[in-house]
Image (tube, rainbow, N blue to C red):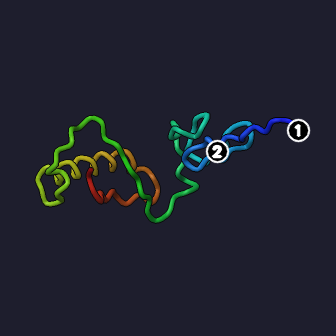
């Protein structure tokens, strides 16, 4: 009898599938282990009446009052963010604006 080697668990992340030699990543995910978001994302094939998006904003400092939807800080940030998204996506067919659900 020869020694038995344990097979590693699936090392793929973000919905990737281990093929035995590498990870097969789902759309919009890249990296050897599907650990990164793709540098370009084709959303036309997945566009529905609404798209849920989690965004990380790195050029602003978060303050606790931004959790409060009635605060000036929250409203100011949401207004600026929405205007920015409108400028970026105004030419996308079907785009109807941005609705911020929460800031954390």
Pointer 1 or 2: first along the chain: 1
Cα separation, mark 1 vs mark 2, equals 27 Å
Residue at the front extreme of this rendering: 1
Q: Residue at x 21, y 42 (%)?
A: 62
In this view, 102 is above or below 81: below
> Which SS class for mark 1?
loop
Q: Name the residue under label 2.
A: 10
Mark 2 residue crowding within 10 angstroms, few (<14) / some (14–19) / many (20+): some
Q: Mark 1 points at which residue?
A: 1
Relative vertical location of residue 100 with respect to residue 17 in this rendering, above or below: below
Residue 32: assigned label: none
Residue 43 horizontal/vertical position (percent): 52, 51
Residue 70 drawn above or below residue 32: below
Q: Residue 89's spot in the image, x, y percent?
A: 40, 49
Residue at image x 34%, y 43%?
56
Between 87 and 8, the residue placed more toward the observer is 8
Residue 6: where, in percent of width, then height?
A: 72, 40
Closer to viewer: mark 1 or mark 2: 1
Q: How crowded is mark 1: few (under 14 residues within 10 Å), some or many (20 or more)?
A: few
Q: Identify the residue at image location x=33%, y=46%.
A: 87
As rendered, which of 54 and 7 lies closer to the eye? 7
Q: Quadrant of the N terminus?
A: top right
Relative horizontal placement of residue 85, taking residue 49 as reference (left or right): left
Side of 94 relative to 44 (left or right): left
Q: Quadrant of residue 33?
A: top right
**Marks 1,2: beta carbons within 8 A:** no
Q: Helix, strand or loop at disc 2?
A: loop
Question: Would residue 38 appear left or right of 78 to someone viewing this image?
Answer: right
In the image as oriented, which residue stretches furthest toward the left?
72
- The percent coordinates of residue 79 (x first, y second) are 21, 51
In this rendering, position of residue 86 left or right of residue 71: right
Residue at 26% x, 52% y: name it.
Answer: 103
């Amino acid at each position: 009898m020869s020694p038995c080697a344990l097979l590693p668990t699936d090392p793929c992340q973000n919905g990737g599938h281990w093929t035995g030699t590498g990870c097969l990543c789902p759309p919009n995910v890249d990296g050897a282990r599907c650990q990164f978001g793709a540098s370009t994302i084709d959303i036309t094939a997945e566009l529905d009446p609404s798209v849920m998006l989690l965004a990380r904003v790195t050029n602003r400092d978060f303050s606790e009052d931004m959790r409060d939807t009635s605060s000036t800080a929250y409203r100011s940030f949401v207004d600026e963010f929405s205007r920015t998204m409108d400028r970026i996506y105004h030419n996308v067919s079907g785009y109807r604006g941005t609705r911020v659900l929460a800031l954390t």
